[in-house]
Image (cartoon, rainbow, N blue to C red):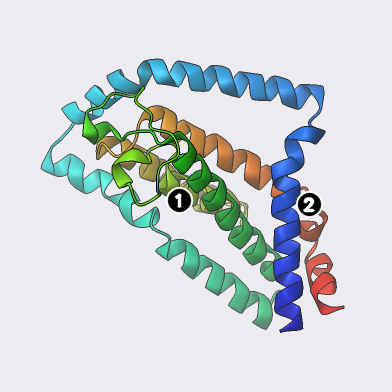
Amino acid sequence: MNRTKKTLALYFSDIKHFLMSPTNWSEKEYLHFLGFLTVMALCFFIDEPVRRFFLSLRSPQADMIFSVGNFYGKGYIQLLCIFVLFYLGTKHKGQLINIAHLLLESIIFSGFVTNLLKVTFGRWRPFTDHGNLHFTPFVYLWKTGQVSFPSADVSLAFSCSLIMAELYDNKLWKALWYILAIMTALGRLYHDKHWTSDVVMSTFLCFYLVKWLKTQPLFLSYKNFSSAINK
């Protein structure tokens, strides 16, 4: 029980520092953020054309291809990865426990921020035909047609793939995880569930989150995490 409390305390500490991290950005990081805002603004201009393009691709064959990402974006594979990493870390290689916590935190943090943005912006999904600039701020999360921005499936996919791809220095291994994440993103566009800007926002969020988590002391070596929760 004491170990669990310390683990949760570390998680809450990390999410607090993550939310406050923009206050510690360097000038270069603020320039990167400005570039991100520019890209996001451009994405709003292409939302409608990209939607029309994917709608034009509709066919039984395309349905089969783009259904690949549907499963990966629902969390089943991610939970399996966490379980396997914890198990192998306990039995064989302790550093994998560290990776398991990194993966779990990335999923929790990205999910929290993604859902917070969803209910704050209240953006209508493409299939509702309200247009890409239609927002109804501060809605309930279960209003599924009004919580498009950003994509939870894409956040879940990239928060996992960005970590799992780095486990082994093998091109095929890395390609597998990146393809799963990319197919999840494309699948959300193809099935008319999200706008391009929703998907881009989720992707940027996960890249920043995973990069930030990897700089935290708890994840520099597995003994840091182990010693922190076993004291």
Relative depth, front residue between 225 and 135: 135
Amino acid beneath label 1: Leu
Q: Residue 40, image x and y in percent? A: 50, 22
Q: Gap in Å between the C-alphas at discs 1 and 2? A: 27 Å
Please identify the quadrant where the C terminus is shown.
bottom right
Label placed on residue 176: 1
Q: Is residue 10 above or below residue 28?
A: below
Can residue 153 be seen at all in this image of the molecule?
yes
Neighbourhood count class around disc 1 (C-alpha, 10 Å): few under 14, some 14–19, many 20 upward: few
Which residue is painted at 44% across and 47% down in the image? Answer: 152
Quadrant in the rendering for residue 193? top left
Relative depth, front residue between 182 and 217: 217
Q: Residue 216, image x and y in percent? A: 78, 52
Relative depth, front residue between 137 and 16: 137
Which residue is painted at 73% across and 75% down in the image? Answer: 5
Q: Is residue 89 above or below residue 72?
A: below
* Element on which disc 1 rests: helix
128 left or right, relative to 188: left
Tell me which label, 1 or 2, sits earlier in the chain: 1
Residue designated by label 2: 216
* Element on which disc 2 rests: loop
Label placed on residue 91: none
Q: Residue 108, image x and y in percent? A: 57, 57
Please identify the quadrant where the N terminus is shown.
bottom right
Neighbourhood count class around disc 2 (C-alpha, 10 Å): few under 14, some 14–19, many 20 upward: few
Q: Residue 184, image x and y in percent? A: 37, 45
Which residue is painted at 43% across and 28% down in the image? Answer: 197
Which residue is painted at 66% across and 59% down in the image? Answer: 102
Q: Which one is in front in this view, the residue at disc 1 or the one at disc 2? A: 2
114 left or right, relative to 196: right
